[in-house]
Image: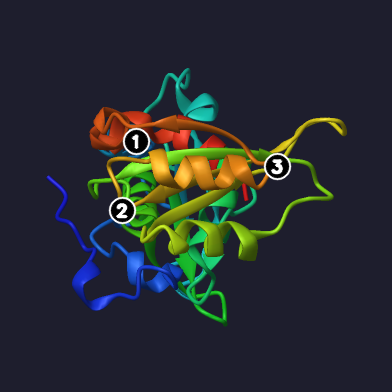
């Protein structure tokens, strides 16, 4: 039903901003839209929250949720008969990380995008955010993953990069998992170009790093749309 609006071949994968993920096919509800239209749109787009746009100003008037209208007997009533929630949105020039943070914080699948004046421009879908992260982190590129655990005091990216590149490997992607409690180690997952990680791991261990490896590519070939919630929670930025 929905066309893909991502043009990754024309994007810098490391500097993706909201307007580059924009989907303009989605049409927000208007205050005079019927409850039946809201329910149909939620079903079609597999979401429980839908933005409402003021037809005069072009700005968001709020959001309507499934919980507020599911039990209404008269589906022919206008959605203005239901109290709107505050709008959740990102600005068009905000980074992919902020888009992911907002989706995680508010648990939404669709996130409206507005310009600097607050005028509605379109929406971003969760699946497109994950595809952007996939490109950014080279998830589907052949390689291996090394996970390194370090204390906060010993955490430095520059040394890790140097030790890996000295062994002739290229870093394809890197994530940092911050500890949830004070005494936990920082966990750094590094995607490298080599299938055989033995030389890199040996070098890291000689320099005192605790490492684990994941050489199977199935983790990275999994359909990312089915891993949406897991990946967004992992990338809690």
Task: Give me the C-alpha separation between circle 3 and circle 2.
Answer: 24 Å
The answer to whether residue 84 is visible is no
Mark 1: secondary structure: helix
Q: Earlier in the sequence, mark 3 or mark 2?
A: 3
Residue 89 placement (x, y as % from top left): 55, 59
Task: Give me the C-alpha separation between circle 2 and circle 1.
Answer: 42 Å
Rendered residue at 47%/22% (across/down): 72
**In this rendering, is residue 233 above or below 7?**
above
Query: For residue 216, what is the image quadrant?
Result: top left
Depth order, front residue of 185/14: 185
Residue behind mark 3: 178
Q: Tell me the mark number nearer the camera, choosing from 3 and 2.
A: 2
Residue behind mark 1: 42
Rendered residue at 37%/41% (across/down): 197
Rendered residue at 47%/48% (across/down): 190
Depth order, front residue of 180/121: 180
**In this rendering, is residue 130 above or below 120?**
above
Q: Tell me the mark number nearer the camera, choosing from 1 and 3.
A: 3
Q: Which mark is residue 193?
A: 2
């Amino acid at each position: 039903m929905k066309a893909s609006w991502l043009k990754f071949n024309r994007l810098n994968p490391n500097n993706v901003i909201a307007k580059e993920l924009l989907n303009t096919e989605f049409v927000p509800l208007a205050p005079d839209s019927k409850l039946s239209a809201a329910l149909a749109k939620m079903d079609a787009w597999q979401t429980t929250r839908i933005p409402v746009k003021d037809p005069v100003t072009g700005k968001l008037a709020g959001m309507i949720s499934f919980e507020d209208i599911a039990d209404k007997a008269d589906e022919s009533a206008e959605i203005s008969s239901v109290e709107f929630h505050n709008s959740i949105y990102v600005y068009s020039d905000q980074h992919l990380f902020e888009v992911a943070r907002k989706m995680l914080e508010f648990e939404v699948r669709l996130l409206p995008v507005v310009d600097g004046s607050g005028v509605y421009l379109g929406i971003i879908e969760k699946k497109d955010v994950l595809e952007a992260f996939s490109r950014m982190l080279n998830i589907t590129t052949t390689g291996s993953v090394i996970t390194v655990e370090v204390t906060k005091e010993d955490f430095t990216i520059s040394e890790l990069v140097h030790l890996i590149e000295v062994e002739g490997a290229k870093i394809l992607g890197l994530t940092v998992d911050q500890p949830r409690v004070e005494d936990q180690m920082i966990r750094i997952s590094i995607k490298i170009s080599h299938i055989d990680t033995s030389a890199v791991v040996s070098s890291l261990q000689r320099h005192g790093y605790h490492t684990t490896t994941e050489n199977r590519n199935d983790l990275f070939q999994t359909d990312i749309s089915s891993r949406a919630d897991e990946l967004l929670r992992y990338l809690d930025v």
